[in-house]
Amino acid sequence: MATPIYEFAQLPQVKGPAVALARPAREPGAPPRVGVIYNPRSHRNKGADFDCGISPQIHIAQPGDRSQLPAALEEFARNGIDLLVINGGDGTVRDVLTCGAPIFGDDWPAIAVLPKGKTNALTVDLGLPADWSLQSAIDAFENGNRVLRRPLDITAIGESGDTGESSRVVGFILGAGALTTATQAGQGAHRLGAFNALAVGATTAWGVLQWLFASRNNSWRRGARMAIGLGADNVAMSHSGVGDPEWRQILLASTLETMPAGLKPFGPMRKGLKLAVTDQISRRSLLLLLAMIRGKVSAKMREKGFHRISTPQFTLAIDESFILDGEAFPGGKYRIAQGAELEFVTP
C-alpha cells in the first residue's frame, strides 16, 4: 500500500482461513453492514476524512502496511459485511483483492472504490465521479447500479509446472516491456504534479520522443524477452517476424473495458481478458502504434508486428519485471487468468 513504485521480490504469499468464510444473510430492512479499508497514504487522503456519521454498522480499518490487510479483511468477513469500501488508488485495490481472495473465495460482498490514489484506472472504467464519497457509496448500495468485473488472477508456475496458489496477486492492468519503463516514467510525472489522465498523457508523449530518437538498446524500444502461451493448451503466440522473435516490445493485458485518457489499445470495447502485444516494431510504425492505442483497426497491423487477442487465460515467461496496477513484480513464469466475478457499486 505504499505510494511510490515498489519492486516486489516475489508474488505476495497470501493465506486465508482453511475455507472461505461464509457471510451471514442480511435481515430484511436492516441497514447494510459496511467494511472500509482506508489507506491514509493514498494521494488524495488527508486524515480521517470520512463524511458520514460513525455507525455500529460501519467497520473501519486503517492497515499500516500490506501485512495487516488479511487480518482486517478476515474480521470484516466474520462481521458479515454487505459492502466493502476501498478508499485508495489502484494499488490499494490490488492489495485488497489479493489479500481478500482466500478469505472471500467466490462469495465477495459488493465493492465500492473511492478514487483517492494517484492513478484510479478502475474507477474510470466504472464511471465513478471524482467526488465519489463513502456516504455516496453507501447510498448507492441501496439505490445505485452494479457493474460486474473479473480481475486478473496471476499465479507463479513452478519448475514442475504447478501453480503456487498461495503465491498470487490480483489486479486489473498488467504491463511489460516498454510499459515497465513507462510506469517508472509515470512516477516521475507524479513527482512533477501530474496524475491520472494527465500523467498518462505526459508519459505517452515522453515515450513517443524516446521512440523517435533512441536506439534499439534504449529500454523504450528494446522491450523484454518473453514467451506467451495462449489458452488452456498454452499455444505459443504468433510472431510477425519483425525484430527478434524472442522479444516483445510491449505487452498490455486487462479485463477493464474503458482505459484512462481515452486510450483503446484493445480496439472496440470487449469483455473478458484482452491482450495487446507488439513485436520489436520499427520507428516507421510509430503512426500505426498511435492509431492502435486509439482503437483503430488495420489489416496490416499483424504483419507489422501488432497483435490484439482475447483469451480466457495465458502464460507469461519473462526475464524482466512486469507491472501490475502501478507496482513491479519479478520476472519468472506465470499463469494469468480471470479471477472471481466481483460486483462493484456505482451511482
Image (cartoon, rainbow, N blue to C red):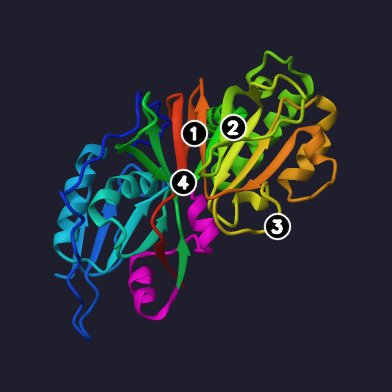
Residue at image position (52%, 25%) is 318
The image position of residue 308, as x and y in percent, is: 68, 44
Check disc 4 and report its element: helix, strand or loop: strand
Q: Which badge, 4 or 3, is on the more N-terminal residue?
A: 3
Between label 2 and label 3, give the one nearer the viewer.
Answer: 3
C-alpha separation, residue under disc 4 versus residue under disc 2: 20 Å
Q: Does the magenta-highlighted stretch encompass residue 123?
A: yes
* Three-letter amino acid code at the position of disc 1: Ile
Q: Are marks 4 and 2 in contact (CB under 8 Å)?
A: no
Q: Which residue is mark 1?
A: 323
* Three-letter amino acid code at the position of disc 3: Pro
* Three-letter amino acid code at the position of disc 2: Leu
Q: Does the magenta-highlighted stretch encompass residue 162?
A: no
Q: Residues within 10 Å of mark 4 (few under 14, many from 20)?
A: many
Q: Residues within 10 Å of mark 2 (few under 14, many from 20)?
A: many
Asked if residue 65 can be seen in this view, the reply is no
Residue at image position (26%, 69%) is 82
C-alpha separation, residue under disc 1 versus residue under disc 2: 8 Å
Q: Which residue is mark 3?
A: 268
Q: Which mark is residue 179?
A: 2
C-alpha separation, residue under disc 4 versus residue under disc 3: 21 Å
C-alpha separation, residue under disc 1 versus residue under disc 3: 24 Å
Asked if residue 175 can be seen in this view, the reply is yes
Q: Are marks 1 and 2 in contact (CB under 8 Å)?
A: yes
Q: Which residue is mark 4?
A: 337
Between label 4 and label 1, give the one nearer the viewer.
Answer: 4
* Side of 189 relative to 150 (left or right): right
* Side of 322 relative to 297 (left or right): left
* Three-letter amino acid code at the position of disc 4: Ala
Along the viewing direction, whichever of 273 and 93 lies nearer the viewer: 273
Q: Are marks 1 and 3 in contact (CB under 8 Å)?
A: no
Q: Residue furthest toward the front?
A: 233
